[in-house]
Amino acid sequence: MGYMWGEGRAPVPGEMAPGRRSGLLSQKLAATALSGCLLVVMPHMVLAASTDVGTVPEAAIATVTATELAQAVSSDPSFRFDIPAQTLTSALVEYSRITGIDVVIDGDLSSNHVTPAFKGEMTANQALDSLLNGTGLTWQALDSHTVSIVTVHVDQSLSPVVTAPVTITSYAGRGVGVDADPETVYETPGGLSVVTRDDMQKVPGREARDIFGQVAGVDISNDARDPGLTVNVRGQQEMGRVNVNIDGARQNYNQTTHGTTSRVYVDPALLANVTIDKTNMNQSGGAGTSAGIVTLRTLNTDDILDFGEDWGGKVNLSHGTNNYNFAGDASVAARVSPKLDIAAAMSRKTIGNYRAGSRNPELFTLSSGKEYTTENSRPEYTFSRQTSGLLKANIQLTDDQELHLGYVGSMVDYAKTSDVTNLYTDFNETQTHTLTAKHNWNPDSELIDLNTNLYWTRTKNHQNRPARYNSSGRVTTDSFSTDYTLDTAGADIANSSDWYLGKLAGGSSSIRFNYGTEFFQDKAKTDSSTGGEGGSGEDYQLEGSTPGGKRDVYGGFLKTTYDWDEMFQVYGGLRYDRYQLDGNAYWCDTAHPCTSGGVPYDVNLSDQKVSPSFGASVTPFDGIQFFANYRKNMRAPTIAEAMIKGEHIGDVGIPFYANGNLQSEESETKEIGVNFKFDDVLQKHDRFRAKFTYYRTKIDNYVTLGYVPEPTTNVSCIPSPCTPSYIGRTITTNQAAAMVNLTDPVYINGSEFDLNYDADMYYLGGTLTLNDVDLKGNYNPFVLNTAYDEYANYQLDEVKPANLFNLTGPIYGNGGTLYGIYAPPKRKITLDGGLRLFDRNLILGMRATFVEPQDNFGSSNISTVVGKYFSYRIFDFYSSYKINDHVAVRLAVNNFLDEAYVQGSGGTYAAAPGRTGILTLSGNF
């Protein structure tokens, strides 16, 4: 189980034992790498000493009288509360999270009662009295860390029997995966973004990529022809730079094609929330990651059942225009017993080829300068059929141990083209299966909150490439049937330990240690066969471009955070990362053709690095927090980067070279920012939230695809063949491609602004993202461990009678011979505002997005990748009406003004969907 965000202050000595309280620090920072031995030994050591940190022995609890229990709850534990105005149920969850006191509800709570916001330092009973004031409810103590909420006419004497109880525990809402409370964004001293299920549902998207449209510092690079996600965080994407995971299970799938290669397949109908952490890599999930951790948490029991329900479900049915044919999902859950609950969900979506927008039809120019519009770059082959499901089981093993088991699966059929003209189509069936097992041990000790996670993911794509024909009907390239498979298995274990250090200069002083270790392994395999129709094409071409191999990545972290009175925090930490990658490759050139097997080339790469991080935050006034962070990270090369081999499909004649000298990327990120969090600003119970962040990232050894020379050259002489008596001679280089390290550093500078104002009846929010990206650079083009011809990277023209010796080059190894590096938009602005009417039953809202793409894409001068996209603006309308407690209807119109545009992140050619209306009927039972 993970912590709720914004925990309360640790109690001073002599205070009531707060039960399973997760600690004082409002932010969970911690650091440096500890060994697995420490992880095993330390919990046992601290458990033996747990009675020294305020826990109550079981025997003592069993003999406590009702009077003593009431006195315990109303004794003198002081906590810092900051609970916004919300329903009483949600406020009690916040109360339980902060104090660690379990709350039992004897009967139902009114869902209409809203508690006012309150903040400050007070005892547990003072806060509870404040929450229940005016509700007709009161509380009574049941044991040393449990209270019961009852109506005022109920006998207050302690009773062993509670009628129709519903319990809010200090575990409540912690769930499995990452807690995605939006308030956390404005309490975390670093880059953090949250997308809730409400955010995803209010404007239904065509693909999973649409749920990230309003997130600062995040963009999606692939277009709607591929339902997979390629997430760009602060200018970095693909190849593990961003750890995109489903319920903590890494999704590392890569498939080489034109455009982006890393894709994550998930159905947004199954998602509960999304958390994007852009700062803290000293946690589980940080191994081999340099830009961020994106956690896609899927539905579980607490997301499906309403408060107080023992069983139930939810259903959504959608239909729309522009070939948005059908989307439907159903989820059910049951609390079988106090020790077991289960959840299941199914989803089905069928969409056809959409129509692009008609307004402002200019889309982009190639690096050659040729301009494309909706007339010559049509979004054909954008249909998909997706079926998804999940199954979860949550088991309370003991009072302080939980086990969470989960399966999430998806199968999607779709067609796509990766060229500008939509001539060459692939038909795909992609399956993803993810298994997770999570265990949490959280005894009555401030020193133990041990989380263990085991997972396995398989992504398999069966691709059928029909034969290609020329205008006369002759086969030019044979058909291909290819299976791409990647298996990822991993485990991580992490613990948090808190020590309260007492009073210092009038304020509470504490320290927290977060430490853990993790491991994962990727195994890739590609099997391909041709149809033999008489054109060009060989099995090894697709097998080599997405190569097989094995990669092991592991590491550990330890992070230490000191907190003084929740006003000042400072942390420092270390990460240790190591990887091992090996596989069998080969290289080909004119003297050693691939059809003959080429030259064997075994790749065995490994590296390790210790990366520091440190930072500080200060809260000089309530509601304002300044912060600064620094970190270094190592990113290990992937199998697809290091092991690429063979040659380009068809008769293109460009071989791919594995790079046995590929180095790990090393990044350095500096970040400063400020959080604002105010209530009752313009009127009572309103809320203002804002986060401003500036960051600068430097990346050494950046890995990208570049053109390189073959070892052998083409030599022609006059007269022919070449002899020492030649009169004229021409030597030309032969072109290949490989993943290379840039010798120049890559710099990414950016600013993120996130603002929200909510006055209940109306709300207004928005984000601003600014990026300045320098992705060009030089590189070493000699990637093979073999001898190269003298003029392998030059062109030589020589005429002896004229004493002419003209040498051109070096040809490869500069920014002009990179294939293409994709960058996020230079500027992106989003706005979101709306009204809540008729007791919040009717919601009307509008969203707007303004995008100015990046000027510098680092595009190769000799490739056909996109050179520059045109700016665009999009407006979306959304609405919802709650008919009753069980039925609601939503209407959304995406791209209301029918704008023609291509998403400005690179690696994509198809215009986005035009105006699309979607009607959704939702119900719960």
Image: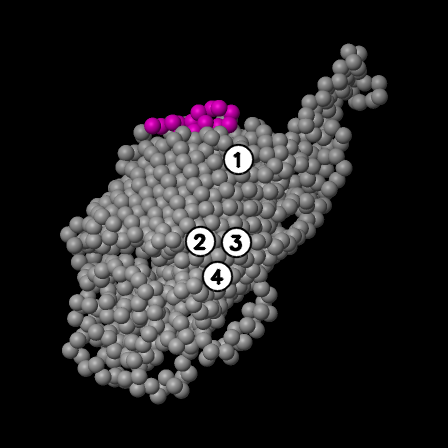
Residue found at x 25% / y 55%: 922
**Residue in the image at 35% along x and 35% along y:** 850
Specify the farthest residue to the top: 802
* Of the two numbered discs 4 and 3 in the rendering, the one whose residue sits closer to the viewer: 4
Amino acid at dot 1: Asp
Query: Circles 1 and 2: CB distance less than 8 Å?
Result: no
Question: How far apart, in angstroms, are the residues tagged by discs 4 and 1?
Answer: 37 Å
Residue 20 falls left or right of residue 834: right
**Circle nearer the N terminus (4, 3):** 4
Secondary structure, mark 2, is strand
User: Residue type at mark 2?
Assistant: Ser
**Amino acid type, callout 3:** Phe
The label number, if any, that marks residue 617 in the structure image: 2
Q: Nearer the viewer, residue 201 or 280?
A: 280
Q: Which residue is mark 3?
A: 614
For the residues labelled 4 and 3, say whether their Cβ atoms are less than 8 Å apart. no
How far across and how far down the image is residue 708, in percent? Answer: 65, 34
Mark 4 belongs to which amino acid? Answer: Tyr
Among the two numbered marks 4 and 2 on one chain, the one whose residue lies closer to the N terminus: 4
Q: CA distance from mark 2 to mark 3?
A: 11 Å
* Left or right relative to 506: residue 86: left
Label 1 neighbour load within 10 Å: few <14, some 14-19, many 20+: some
Report the magenta residues as a range: 360-373
Secondary structure category for the residue under label 4:
strand
Q: How far is disc 1 from disc 3 in space, using C-alphas? A: 26 Å
- Mark 1–mark 3 CB contact (< 8 Å): no
- Picture layout, residue 299 above or below residue 152: above
Mark sitting earlier along the chain (4/1) = 4
Label 4 vs label 1, nearer the camera: 4
